Image: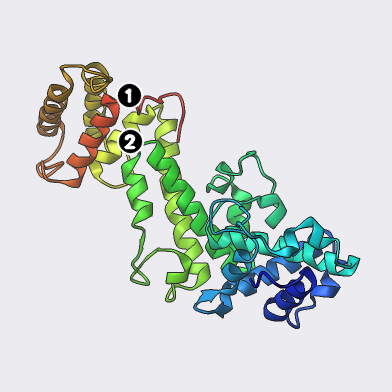
Amino acid sequence: MNQTRTASEELAYIEKYFFKKVGLAKACSLEGEERRDYRLAQVDRLLTEMHGGVPKALWLSDMFWTGDKGRILPEKPTPLLLLKEQQTLTDKEMGRVRLILEIAGLCHDLSIHFTFDLEEAFGIKSNNLLGYSDFGVSNKQLVDWLTTTKYEHIAMHTAYIMKKVAISVYEYGHYQPAQDELAELFSLEYNELIREPEFMERIPPRAYVQIIIDAMLRIERHWQRGLKRKLKPDVIILHDEIYGVIPRQFDKGVLQAAQALYDYLDNNVYGRLVGNNPFGPEAMELFAKKVREVRSKYLAEGWIADDSLEFAYLMAHAQNCGYGFWREEDEAL
């Protein structure tokens, strides 16, 4: 943005480069669903139109806010956000500014993949004041909207936000198989890792959305099956760590192994790495020995080899337990 432009000149510049021949002035009188639909149409368009190697959506959002979490003003904000400058605009010009800000706000959140107000953006009621848990696959309204909307590029970026949120939740809960599965989500059909949307040139938007939702639903359903069996959350996690992935069933032998390891962690590892406990390092060594013992007793040959990812998962779990980070039995992820 040119800092020497007046508010009126800045508005004219934005209209010329971002809203030419899209009926912006007429749309200012729209309300409710009609206004929301216009906003979404413009955001979807701006996510695909490029300028200087970046989507126009990002370019527009950077004219108002920094590329950071939330909408943070830069050191020298656009005159369109300064009250003194706004007072130089006519009522009609301010009407266009307000609509541009609504569009630029969603452009900002989608471009940096940050959670946003689903009710304001899509008309989907929010159940959480922070708007965080609303981005899970348990939000059926959101899933339905993403899989049916005509605004496919908005859906694609929103699905990626869902993936990011889920990874953060699983990371916080030390649920490494789920965290890694989503972080390294791969499409066999398109032979592509599911990375940020701008790098997904060979995956159609609808397919991209469905791949993420299918993966998240599979993890969620597996988790709910375990809870219905009255398994403790940590037993579910241990079971899946023994597999090294999120399995499609709860294997009896693996459950027995997970329960044995859970009991051992509970009695011999929990809290051992806190402070100057002299049994800390020894507790980890004894846990590794216990893993080998359980492996021999409950599992077929080839399971959780010492140099395997599964063994590393279990040792990381033990370390978290040793620091007292994982004892959240009464709350499901």
Quadrant housing residue 58: bottom right
Q: Is residue 19 left or right of residue 159?
A: right
Q: Residues within 10 Å of mark 1 (few under 14, many from 20)?
A: some
- Quadrant location of the N terminus? bottom right
Q: Residue at x 81, y 58 (%)?
A: 84
Residue 324 badge = 1
- Work out whether 244 lies above or below 6: above
Q: Count all numbered tags in the image, as a single digit.
A: 2
**Dot 2 corresponds to which residue?**
237
Q: Secondary structure at mark 1?
A: loop
Label 2: element kind: helix
Looking at the image, residue 95 lies above or below residue 130: below
Residue drawn where x is 38% and y is 30% of the image: 233
Applied colour scheme? rainbow
Q: Nearer the viewer, residue 39 or 235?
A: 39
Q: Position of residue 192 (x, y in %)?
A: 35, 69
Give the left or right position of residue 317, taking residue 133 as reference: left
- Residue 211 location, x and y as percent? 44, 61
Q: Answer with mark 2 or mark 1, whichever residue precedes in sequence.
A: 2
Query: On the rendered structure, is 153 left or right of 318?
Result: right
Q: Nearer the viewer, residue 258 or 36?
A: 36
Tell me the crowding category of disc 2: few under 14, some 14 to 19, or many 20 or more residues within 10 angstroms, Cα based: many
Between 322 and 151, the one lying in front of the other is 322
Question: What amino acid type should be assigned to the residue bearing mark 1?
Answer: Gly
Q: Which mark is residue 276?
A: none
How far across and down, in percent of the image, does residue 286 sit? 12, 24
Q: CA distance from mark 2 to mark 1?
A: 16 Å
x 24%, y 43%: residue: 243
**x and y percent of residue 200 in the render?**
43, 71
